[in-house]
Image (cartoon, rainbow, N blue to C red):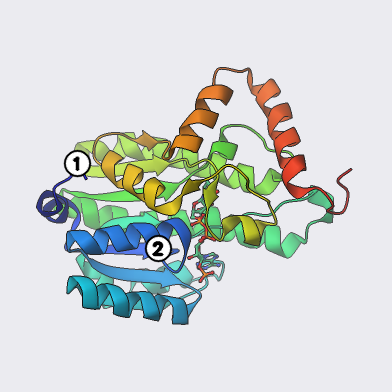
Amino acid sequence: MSHPAEAFLRLYGPAALVTGASNGIGRAIASALASYGLDLVMVARNETALGELADDLAARHGIAVTVIAADLSAPGAAGAILGHPSVDRVGLLVAAAGFGSAGRFDTLPLADELAMVDVNCRAVVALAHGMAPRLVARGQGGMIIFASLVGWQGAPFAATYAATKAFVQSFGEALHRELRPAGVDVLVAAPGPVATGFGNRAGMALTMTDTADIVAADILRALGKRGQVTPGRVGRLLTMALWPLPRTLRVGIMGRIMKGMVQGKAGIP
Ligand SMILES: NC(=O)c1ccc[n+]([C@@H]2O[C@H](COP(=O)([O-])OP(=O)(O)OC[C@H]3O[C@@H](n4cnc5c(N)ncnc54)[C@H](OP(=O)(O)O)[C@@H]3O)[C@@H](O)[C@H]2O)c1
């Protein structure tokens, strides 16, 4: 890592709040932070998975880990997390919890689409809003929030998901500028396809993928240096290929890619 662990700990410690720590990218980031010596407050719904990871990281790195089992689609979940005493020591928010869906919009259950907006957007705003004044008061700290390659344009057959990620992208790039003078580093991570639990839950067959460990390492390396990172080799390649194209063309390409990933679902030829 280009951040020596001690410097990282001084800037962003003594503890990190990581949502989505039970799986995928959040889990990989939590593990890397533990290896730097940061204590952890880990959030997700799967308490068993969090507990097992907490025991492992505490034993291997001698850190303190607090587990908070919470459903971030529930109203008040973010508030309850922010009110937990362990969060008082947090210098870094990693808001990795999120999920997607795939299919023609009219065939997808509204409750799931709205829960996605709540987890991917509403909870991120609530957590960032709770953490920002604390970090500003300290004059240092960081927040990592998750956009996506699909958030650069509309993505037919993942319309709501892409829109939630466009929201996070815009929100994060603004916060980066707002909070930088106060010493707070905000980083928007926009991965391409990553081999995690994401594809399974969203019903997308991801083919070319980056690994969660590589994506986590790229993200942590970028923190404090930039406001935006496209982590992973596949993510960077796809971004380079898509980015120069006109937005309308990218929407069409995204539609064809998504269609290929979700074929067989209702409404998709
Ligand atoms: N994988 C990709 O291809 C990809 C690409 C671009 C962006 N991203 C973004 O990267 C972030 C991490 O995704 P991932 O790939 O690591 O997916 P993942 O392996 O499915 O992990 C998602 C994490 O979010 C948690 N989560 C989901 N719903 C939740 C809820 N209602 N309340 C609390 N926690 C919840 C899950 O834990 P529980 O199930 O235990 O609640 C899990 O820990 C997401 O924001 C995703 O949109 C992923």
Q: Is disc 2's CB within 8 Å of ligand 1?
A: yes
Residue matched to label 1: 2
| Residue visible at 26% across and 54% down in the picture | 133
Q: Residue 157 versus residue 165: which sits nearer the camera?
A: 157
Residue matched to label 2: 27
Give x and y (percent) for residue 103: 77, 50
Residue type indicated by callout 1: Ser
Tell me if residue 96 can be seen: no
State the SS at label 2. helix
Residue type indicated by callout 2: Arg
Give x and y (percent) for residue 65: 27, 75
In the rendered view, does 142 fall on the left or right side of 192? left
In the rendered view, does 96 fall on the left or right side of 42? right
Question: Picture quarter containing residue 54?
Answer: bottom left
State the SS at label 1. loop
For disc 2, the neighbor class at 10 Å (few under 14, some 14 to 19, many from 20) is many
Tell me if residue 217 can be seen: yes
Quick check: marks 2 and 1 in contact, CB under 8 Å?
no
For disc 1, the neighbor class at 10 Å (few under 14, some 14 to 19, many from 20) is few
